[in-house]
């Protein structure tokens, strides 16, 4: 593991982890310029309410959690992560940056129902672990699954206390989002990795249609994001990050 200081934050990471660790080592961040562009787009659209909670679903080692707090745009973070090794690194990064009192870590996978599923782990990519109904090989382990709605009830949080939702869970996004319906129904800005090839055409259309019922604008994440009415966008047919507002 390496620890590097990037000025306004520090990150501990495995430089052999591909692609997250290697990208941090080579470029100094894990898509932080993209993250800042997303915040700028939301501010420009009047859709970023400062000092609210950032929800990081699939938090991994905590890069976006740290960027969210370092940006000054959010008061706290709720980080959802099921993998034990990622959790240890996430905790180290929270402590390393002095954010212990500002990050609430939920040790579970986010889904559409409470229960237990399997986490099928990637050997080389800490961000490539997948939640599934059945185990797949020796690197599979049972994992607790919670709904975000249940976490909100447990912590007595209201949907309007959240400023942004970040969901990247390797193809389990429809289930994770289905379990946070009170927040989605309030149209809290959402950035989601839309894994169309994993979902299949039918599930992809259903997922996109569900989001289109609650959000009026969306943009494909890029260096020059431009919001368009959701009704003008077709269901993606490939993996793409989409910002709903």
Image (cartoon, rainbow, N blue to C red):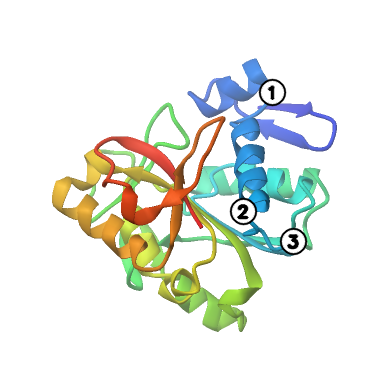
> Which circle's residue, 2 or 3, is located before the other in the chain?
2
- The answer to whether residue 52 is above or below residue 122 is below
Of the numbered discs in the image, which one, if any, rests on residue 71? none
Mark 2 closeness class: few <14, some 14–19, many ≥20 residues within 10 Å: few
Q: Secondary structure at mark 2?
A: loop
Disc count in the image?
3
Of the two numbered discs 2 and 3 in the rendering, the one whose residue sits closer to the viewer: 2
Q: 10 Å neighbourhood of mark 3: few (<14), some, or many (≥20)?
A: some
Give the label, 2 or 1, closer to the camera. 2
Visible residue check, residue 194? yes
Residue wearing tag 3? 50
Q: Residue furthest left?
A: 202
Between marks 1 and 3, how big is the CA–CA gap?
26 Å
Neighbor class of circle 1 (other Cα within 10 Å; few <14, some 14-19, many 20+) is some
Mark toward the viewer: 1 or 3: 3
List the single residue furthest toward the top: 26
Q: Name the image quarter holding residue 123.
A: top left
Query: Is 178 located above or below residue 45 in the figure?
Result: below
Q: Earlier in the sequence, mark 1 or mark 3?
A: 1
First in sequence: mark 2 vs mark 1: 1
Q: Secondary structure at mark 3?
A: loop
Pointer 2 residue: 45
Position of residue 68 in the picture relative to residue 195 (left or right): right
Q: Which residue is mark 1?
A: 28
* Quarter of the image that includes the N terminus: top right
Answer whether residue 172 is visible to the viewer in this image: no
Q: Using the image as rendered, state which of residue 19 and residue 3 is in the foreground.
A: 19
**x and y percentages locating residue 241 in the rendered image:** 43, 41
Q: Position of residue 96 (x, y in %)?
A: 79, 43
Q: Position of residue 219 (x, y in %)?
A: 46, 45
């Amino acid at each position: 593991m390496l620890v590097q200081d990037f000025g306004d934050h520090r990150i501990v990471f495995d430089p052999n982890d591909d692609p997250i660790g290697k990208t941090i080592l080579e470029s100094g961040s894990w898509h932080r310029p993209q993250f800042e562009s997303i915040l700028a787009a939301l501010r420009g659209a009047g859709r970023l309410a400062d000092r609210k909670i950032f929800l990081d679903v699939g938090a991994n080692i905590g890069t976006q959690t740290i960027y969210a707090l370092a940006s000054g745009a959010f008061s706290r973070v709720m980080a959802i992560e099921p993998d034990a090794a990622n959790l240890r690194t996430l905790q180290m990064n929270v402590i390393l940056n002095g954010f212990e009192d500002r990050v609430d870590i939920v040790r579970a996978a986010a889904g559409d129902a409470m229960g237990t599923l399997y986490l099928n782990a990637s050997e080389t990519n800490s961000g490539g672990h997948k939640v599934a109904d059945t185990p797949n090989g020796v690197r599979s382990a049972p994992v607790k699954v919670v709904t975000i709605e249940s976490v909100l009830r447990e912590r007595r949080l209201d949907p309007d206390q959240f400023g942004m939702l970040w969901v990247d869970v390797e193809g389990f996004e429809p289930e994770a989002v289905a379990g946070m319906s009170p927040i989605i129904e309030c149209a809290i800005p959402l950035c989601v990795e839309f894994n169309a090839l994993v979902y299949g055409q039918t599930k992809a259309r259903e997922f996109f249609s569900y989001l289109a019922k609650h959000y009026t604008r969306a943009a494909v994440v890029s260096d020059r994001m431009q919001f368009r009415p959701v009704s003008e966008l077709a269901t993606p047919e490939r993996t793409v990050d989409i910002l709903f507002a």
